[in-house]
Image (cartoon, rainbow, N blue to C red):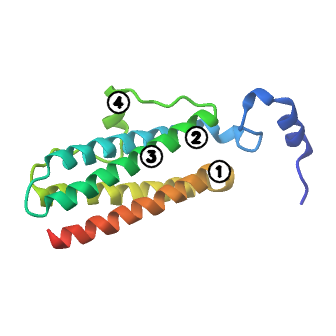
Amino acid sequence: MRIDEAAVQAARDNLSDGAVTPGVHPYAEEICKLLNDALATEWVCTLRYRRHHYTAKGLASPAIADEFLTHANEEQAHADRITERIVQLGGAPDLDPDTLSKRSHAEYDASTELQAMIRANLVAERVAIEVYRQMIQLIGDKDPTTSRMLREILAQEEEHADELSDWMAKA
């Protein structure tokens, strides 16, 4: 096994590519497409959680509403990380409001009943978990930095699903 000296030289020569070195370059556009769809999902999840936070009513609603806000903030942090990575890879983050819900893997939800809100958020978290697992498989070692970021986001999405599952049993 040997280091690809031509790729090392290309890394030296192509400074305008920033973090996109020759090893990642062939995959950067495809990875940005995957990340932009994940970005749309995170924004839809942020908006859904925020709506649920402000509209949750019922005996258990203050605690659940607080949890919804926490999750909304964490989903927004995921969106920020994904956006930064897209830019690092030389892509353009697609935040067009007209296409966010069309590109999102998860759905927006306007439920007014607390149990339905919890269920909608749990479904969305489970969808996100599956999508992130597939993305990690697809990207693999083509881009270790993106794979690591996705694993970290996946772990938090799994925590969200566990918490929502617990709330579903209580509500």
Q: Amino acid at mark 3?
A: Ala
Residue under pointer 2:
85
Tell me whether circle 2 and circle 1 mark residues in contact (CB < 8 Å).
yes
Label 2 to label 1: alpha-carbon separation: 9 Å
Spot occupied by residue 122 in the image (x, y as percentages of width and height)? 27, 60
Q: Amino acid at mark 2?
A: Arg
Q: Amino acid at mark 1?
A: Thr
Q: Amino acid at mark 4?
A: Thr
- First along the sequence among labels 2 and 1: 2
**Dot 2: element:** helix
Label 4 to label 3: alpha-carbon separation: 20 Å
**Dot 4: element:** helix
Residue under pointer 4:
99
Q: Alpha-carbon neighbours of circle 2 within 10 Å: few (<14), some, or many (≥20)?
A: many
Residue under pointer 3:
77
Residue under pointer 1:
145
- First along the sequence among labels 4 and 1: 4
**Dot 3: element:** helix
